[in-house]
């Protein structure tokens, strides 16, 4: 596994997203209330572009007419057929036992840490004041 700098933390505001390529794979990076999550930009159903999906919350119902809405901004709906996934885990809500999209850990590293690594000069402009997003893959 290697570490890849993909963006500055400031590039993706809260509730925002960015599509990046890491080792030839498209990864959608999401900012959920200041925490960053990466997800393969390929829906496990039929390959839809996950990064273009609507971000919403979780609707649950134990019986007809009763609904509970929670986790606003943490659920991603695939733009092709509407399957929903937990952005934090990749878990599917269509068939949570079997289907999950691939997710990747994303960390925020200080500029100082990144500057000391061997990869930063090739990928993004260096500023030791800024914070960079690093994907491990
Ligand atoms: S391709 Fe994503 S729901 Fe069908």
Image (cartoon, rainbow, N blue to C red):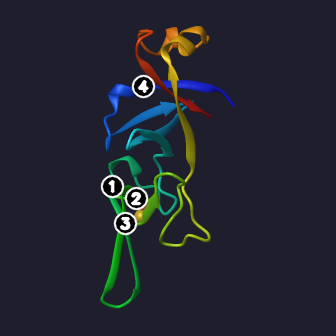
Left or right of 74, for residue 90 = right
Q: Which residue is mark 3?
A: 70
Element under disc 3: strand
Looking at this rendering, what residue extends furthest in the right direction?
1
Which residue is more in the foreground, 108 or 16?
108
Instruction: Give the x, y percent position of residue 125.
Output: 41, 10
Q: Which residue is mark 1?
A: 55
Ligand 1 shown in quarter: bottom left
Q: Which residue is mark 4?
A: 7
Q: Which residue is mark 2?
A: 75
Instruction: Give the x, y percent position of residue 50.
Output: 40, 51
Q: Which mark is residue 118?
A: none
Task: Residue at 49% x, 42% y: name it.
Answer: 38
Left or right of 64, for residue 43 = right
Instruction: Residue 97: name its quadrant.
Output: bottom right
Task: Residue at 40% x, 16% y: name it.
Answer: 130
Which one is earlier in the sequence, the residue at label 1 or at label 4?
A: 4
Distance, label 1 to label 2, CA atoms, is 6 Å
Distance, label 4 to label 3, CA atoms, is 29 Å
* Image quarter (top left, top right, bottom left or bottom right) of the N terminus: top right
Q: Are marks 1 and 2 in contact (CB under 8 Å)?
A: yes
Q: Residues within 10 Å of mark 2 (few under 14, many from 20)?
A: many
Task: Residue at 40% x, 42% y: name it.
Answer: 30
Which one is earlier in the sequence, the residue at label 1 or at label 2?
A: 1
Q: Residues within 10 Å of mark 4 (few under 14, many from 20)?
A: many
Task: Residue at 48% x, 42% y: name it.
Answer: 37
Instruction: Give the x, y percent position of residue 119.
Output: 57, 14
Instruction: Residue 136: name its quadrant.
Output: top right
Element under disc 2: strand
Element under disc 4: strand
Distance, label 1 to label 3, CA atoms, is 13 Å
């Amino acid at each position: 596994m290697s570490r890849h700098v993909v963006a500055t933390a400031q590039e993706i505001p809260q509730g925002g997203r960015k599509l990046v390529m890491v080792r030839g794979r498209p990864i959608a990076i999401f900012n959920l209330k200041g925490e960053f999550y990466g997800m393969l930009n390929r829906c496990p159903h039929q390959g839809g572009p996950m990064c273009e999906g609507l971000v919403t919350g979780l609707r649950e119902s134990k019986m007809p007419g009763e609904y509970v809405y929670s986790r606003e901004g943490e659920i991603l709906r695939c733009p092709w057929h509407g399957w929903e996934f937990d952005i934090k885990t990749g878990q599917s809500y269509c068939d949570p036992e079997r289907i999950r999209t691939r997710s990747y850990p994303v960390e925020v590293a200080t500029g100082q840490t990144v500057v000391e690594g061997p990869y930063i000069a090739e990928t993004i402009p260096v500023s030791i004041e800024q914070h960079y997003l690093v994907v491990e893959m």
